[in-house]
Image: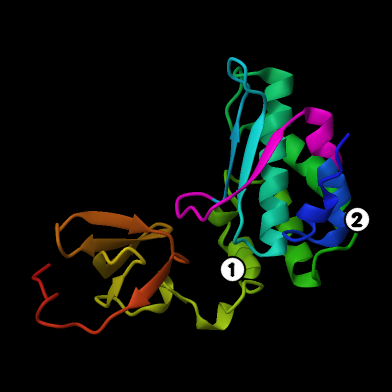
Amino acid sequence: MQDYSATLKRFMPEEAAPIISRWINDTGCLFKISKTRSTKLGDYRAPFRTAGHRISVNHDLNPYSFLITTIHEFAHLQTWQQHKHAVKPHGNEWKSNFQNLMNPFLGLQIFPAEIATAVAQYLANPAASSCTDLHLFRTLKKFDKHADQVLTVEMLPEKSHFKLQNGRVFQKQEKVRKRYKCVELSSNKIYLFHPIAEIYPIETTHQHEKTI
């Protein structure tokens, strides 16, 4: 049995590393620390042909986000072991497994009080992703490196222009339920942005001005 604790300690709270290492060994899971992905924090893939359980978690998450995402994905693994594809990915079975896997970590008191409170509230009815619980997501983002330098969609006034890391330019519009409508200036297509999507503000210039 291989001990992955030394590697895992670089990405999550030290006390949690031996537990996650044991989970990896017990399940025979291929656990990958992944490159940055803008569309997801982590991923679980069920066994297929000769491949076993596979979990990947983004390398650039802060330690608490990394741990919570890891537990989220192991809850998927456990749910698949119990029910295969017979239940919804984030149905009651997954929620119950996530709660059961998370509770011992709260008992270890490895989370700062602010995060522990947000997690406890989230556990009352876990969502498909911690990103969809704005209170938990905002709380976790406070512990990111350079958190004070990050700008998000919700911080900008309506009609402001911003760009993404890939250079695409948008104009912020009104809020629709939990997300903001934003128009891509080059295509005039409308996209829905998470309130805490990280963006780069830009000055409006004639080059980017467009009638919306």
Please state the horizontal and vertical placement of residue 35, each as a whole percent of the image: 54, 53
Q: Is 173 positioned to the left or the right of 148 in the image?
A: left
* Residue 19 makes an appearance in the image: yes
Disc 1 designates what residue?
138
Query: As drawn, which residue projects farthest toward the top?
Result: 49
Contact check, label 1 and label 2, Cβ < 8 Å: no
Please state the horizontal and vertical placement of residue 101, each as a whole percent of the image: 80, 42
Amino acid type at mark 2? Gly
Please state the horizontal and vertical placement of residue 154, each as a whole percent of the image: 42, 72
Q: Is residue 133 located in the magenta-colored stretch of the structure?
A: no
Residue 3, picture quadrant: top right
Disc 2 designates what residue?
107
Query: As drawn, which residue projects farthest toward the right?
Result: 108
Amino acid type at mark 1? Arg
Please state the horizontal and vertical placement of residue 25, each as a whole percent of the image: 82, 34
Q: Residues within 10 Å of mark 1 (few under 14, many from 20)?
A: some
Q: Is 143 positioned to the left or the right of 162 in the image?
A: right
At a point 68% along the width and 19% down the height, the residue shown is: 83
Q: Is residue 34 located in the magenta-colored stretch of the structure?
A: yes
Magenta stretch? Answer: 22-40
Residue 27, picture quadrant: top right
